[in-house]
Every structure is written in structure tokens, then in C-alpha cells.
Amino acid sequence: MREILKQPQYKPIRVSEQIAALLAITAGKFDGIPTDRVREAEQALRKSLTEKLGDLCGRIESGEKLSLPDREILVCVADESAQPLKGEAKRADQ
């Protein structure tokens, strides 16, 4: 959790991206990713959000309350973003 909350100095992370990252962590979507790769997983999630869910991010930024389907979509995108890193971690363990 601590890794996901770190932000680069002078480069604040958008609220929608922070919410998506926290949802991913609490839903266990980054479990199995080595700690030193969590930042990479977060960056992949942020890229996916920008590319796939711009409208939803805009609603979050405007203060709109997240619905359950919105949360489920964010968690699904987080899972898709994390899968390549989980696969790498499994291969490294073998």
C-alpha cells in the first residue's frame, strides 16, 4: 500500500488515478507483483485509465460519486494492467 501512495515530487497524481490504484490494491489485483515492480504496475494502470476510461476519470475528477459498476470497471482494468507483471513474477519463481 505504501508504494502505491508515493508520488513523484512536483508531479501530483490525479485523484481518479489514486482512487483506481487504491481500489486495485484493496481488491488484491497487485498481489503477487514484487514490491519493486508495483510502481510499474501503477503506471500501466494509469496508462490504461487514460486510454480506456477517460470519461469515467473525468467524472471522478469532477467529484461525482463512484457507482458499484464504476468500481467494478476500475478493478477490471487494474487486473488487466497487472496481468503481464504477475506473469513475469511467476516465471521468475520457476
Image (cartoon, grey):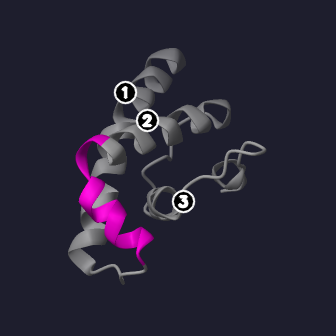
Query: Residue 20 magenta-drawn?
Result: no
**Can you tell which quarter of the image residue 62 is in?**
bottom left
Where residue 84 is drawn, which disc sits there?
1
Secondary-structure class at tag 2: helix
- Callout 2 crowding tier (Cα within 10 Å): few <14, some 14–19, many ≥20: some
What residue does disc 2 label? 44
Instruction: Find residue 27 and report its horizontal and vertical position in percent.
Output: 43, 62
- Labels 3 and 2: the sequence-earlier one: 3
Position of 19 with respect to 8 (left or right) is left
Q: Farthest residue in the right direction?
A: 9
Part of the protein shown in magenta: 51-62
Instruction: Find residue 53 and report its horizontal and vertical position in percent.
Output: 26, 53
Distance (Cα) linking label 3 and label 2: 13 Å
What residue does disc 3 label? 18
Secondary-structure class at tag 3: helix
Instruction: Find residue 91 and report its horizontal and vertical position in percent.
Output: 44, 17
> What amino acid is at disc 2?
Ala
